[in-house]
């Protein structure tokens, strides 16, 4: 498996939830946004990821671009235009990762970093 890093796009299997609700499930791409080993020695092999879904021009993605960054097909080997679902941030076992598709460049990853920063209430650099 290619080395994982922040900004890697992986294909993973997200578990089915009972009861089913709005969480993403099944086989899909996700962006790695956190590596627990960067903060210490983790108990388990986990990644912090944000799942993606196919971009079909959904209105909710257009009206909240900082919460739902969009990527064209071909970005880091994505097969179709995709939306990064920052509101679905989660831990995922390394055992659920099927493959590493590619990695976002720093410029491509920047909207994700900015959206997460805002979502967690970080006002950004102080002057």
Image: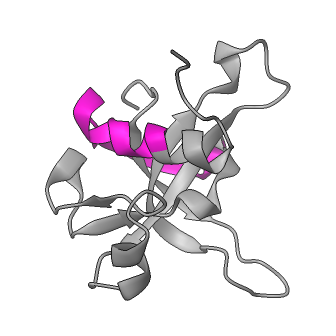
Give 24 or 89, whichever is nearer the viewer. 89
**Residue 105 visible in the shown view:** no
Q: Residue 16: x percent and y percent?
A: 71, 77
Task: Indicate the quadrant where residue 52 lies.
Answer: bottom left
Q: Residue 104: x percent and y percent?
A: 28, 37
- Residue 83's place in the image compared with 113, above or below, is below
Give 56 or 96, whichever is nearer the viewer. 56
Q: Coloured how?
A: one colour
Q: Residue 116: x percent and y percent?
A: 56, 44
Q: Quadrant of the N terminus?
A: top left
Give 5 or 22, whichever is nearer the viewer. 22
For the point 85% across and 25% down, the residue is: 43
State yes or no: residue 101 in magenta: yes
- Residue 60's place in the image compared with 109, above or below, is below
Q: Residue 126: x percent and y percent?
A: 56, 19
Task: State which region is magenta.
Answer: 95-114
Give 68 or 23, whichever is nearer the viewer. 68
């Amino acid at each position: 498996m290619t080395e994982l890093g922040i900004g890697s796009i992986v294909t993973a299997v997200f578990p089915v939830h009972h009861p089913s609700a709005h969480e993403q499930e099944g086989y899909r791409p996700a962006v790695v946004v956190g590596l627990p080993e960067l903060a210490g020695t983790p108990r388990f092999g986990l990644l912090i990821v944000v799942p993606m879904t196919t971009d079909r021009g959904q209105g909710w993605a257009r009206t909240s671009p900082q919460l739902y960054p969009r990527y064209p097909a071909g970005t880091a080997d994505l097969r179709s235009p995709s939306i990064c679902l920052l509101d679905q941030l989660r831990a995922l076992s390394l055992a659920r990762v099927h493959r590493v598709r590619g990695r976002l460049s720093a410029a491509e990853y920047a909207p994700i970093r900015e959206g997460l920063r805002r979502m967690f209430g970080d006002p950004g650099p102080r002057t």
